[in-house]
Image (cartoon, rainbow, N blue to C red):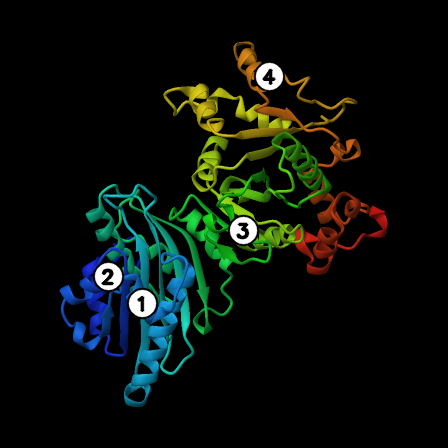
Amino acid sequence: MSGTEPPPSTRQKALAINLATELYGTFSEIGAGQEVARWFFKVGGASGTIAKTMSAYDMTISDVIYGKTQRYVSQRRLEKMLHREFDLLVKRLTPERGSSTRFFSFADTVKAKSYSVESDSHGWMGISFQHKPKARPSVIIIHLRMLNQENIQQQEALGIIGVNLVYGAMLLFEQPEKLIHSLIDALSPGRIEVDMIRFNGPAFRGVDNRLMSLQLVQQGLADAAIFKANGEVVQPSEILRKRAVLVERGSFRPVTKVSVDMLKCALSQFNREYNMKGEKPLVILEMTLHNLNDKGKIDYQDFLDRTDLLGTLGNPVLISNYDTHYRLASFLFRHTHKPIGLVMGVPTLREVFDEKNYTHLKGGILESFGRLFKNDLKLFIYPLLEKGKKEPVTMDHLQVLPHLQHLFAYLRENRNILGIEGYARAYLSIFSRDVLAHIKKGKLGWEKTLPPLVAEMIKKKKLFGYKRQSIKNR
């Protein structure tokens, strides 16, 4: 299919699955009707595709079938549903048709809009399937947010994305990037957000879920995606919920001792400001699409190299399309009500006070600051040593436009913006772009500007065009 052809409709996808005689599976849906299975019944030919459909709404019945759980709308519940139904299907039908059939089990557990309870509408959806007869199961799991305000519209959207997932898994599994893009076929913007996706199993050997997380953001299925230091993708609330959070945004190409010092000093100050009393804030490293963009495109191997290096620091990594800090703040506010800190350098703070960044807002810079500081959020500012200067630019020396000086003073007076204390002055002369150039040229001494594990990995994997130091560069 050429790039200009429209994708198949939801009806066409459901019918294609029904007419594929080698596909046979089950549907288990909890929380918003049987909206996915309904599509396959509605288009006709379902008897050749559907072995069973089920909707265990009652908690007691659900517990009897899948075992007890603390949270019914959770990844763990979804996985139990998938595993049980797939194992039963394969066990019962393999002797009869296993040599010519690719079995699958689709499931979802969701919390749609309720008339009695105001809460986020979200859910887990997945499919366990064989990419060829008798193969071990491969699994795709997604977490989604339903953004429509009416229950009936959420059910409709759920049905569409469910059909898209079944179609993608069974017919597009060899093209995971295309599969991800197809998840929002027939869904207009603002109806569904997919903020986590995980591929596992023999059909996805070589697929890196960190890269798939990037695809979610790059293709517009989510504004942000997150994974742990070990590369495990997670749903944002899983690690952000009820946590105090400290975020440092950067390109991290490569991560230097400056980045580490910023976090160390800001974290110490964060704990004092909020009197954390032993509670450990969650430290997150954020890269935006802008940070990753190089000459109009994203180098995926470079992205993986950077995340490998960040993994040595032991912190989760957030990938986002948040071009302004108030949008990042809104994302964090949605997941936690605990204190939040954003770590940045003086150049970034200057951008925060640049009114050109807020011309799209009716309230301009005042509206953006209202959104940024509406909850318990503080900015921690690391000084800048400009080339040719002896003294660093700190909060005390920062100049803003005359008509913004009172606003700046107000935010400082109320401790919304704080200068970082106790920083390592010797690190202020380190700039990532200079370090990167030295690595590529093979100049001596760049290792001293990086955390030891980072320098070691760059050498071992020959990242960023690393060359051994030549005699002439020593």
Residue 192's x, y, as percent? 32, 48
| Amino acid at the residue labelled 3 | Asp
Q: Which residue is mark 3?
A: 299
For residue 116, above or below residue 111 = above
- Evaluate whether residue 25 shows in this view: yes
Residue density around tag 4, few if under 14, some if 14–19, many if 20 or more, within 10 Å: few
The answer to whether the residues at label 3 and label 2 have Cβ atoms under 8 Å apart is no
Residue 36 - label: 2
Residue, x 85% and y 47% (percent of image)? 474
Q: CA distance from mark 3 to mark 2?
A: 36 Å
Q: CA distance from mark 1 to mark 4?
A: 55 Å
First in sequence, mark 3 or 2: give its number: 2
Q: In terms of secondary structure, where does tag 2 sit?
A: helix
Q: CA distance from mark 4 to mark 2?
A: 55 Å
- Quarter of the picture holding the N terminus: bottom left
Q: Nearer the viewer, mark 4 or mark 2?
A: 4
Residue 413 - label: 4
Residue density around tag 3, few if under 14, some if 14–19, many if 20 or more, within 10 Å: few
Q: Nearer the viewer, mark 3 or mark 4?
A: 4
First in sequence, mark 1 or 2: give its number: 2
Q: Which residue is mark 1?
A: 106
Q: CA distance from mark 1 to mark 3?
A: 34 Å
Residue, x 74% and y 55% (percent of image)? 456
Residue, x 68% and y 29% (percent of image)? 420
Q: In terms of secondary structure, where does tag 1 sit?
A: strand
Q: Nearer the viewer, residue 291 or 67?
A: 67
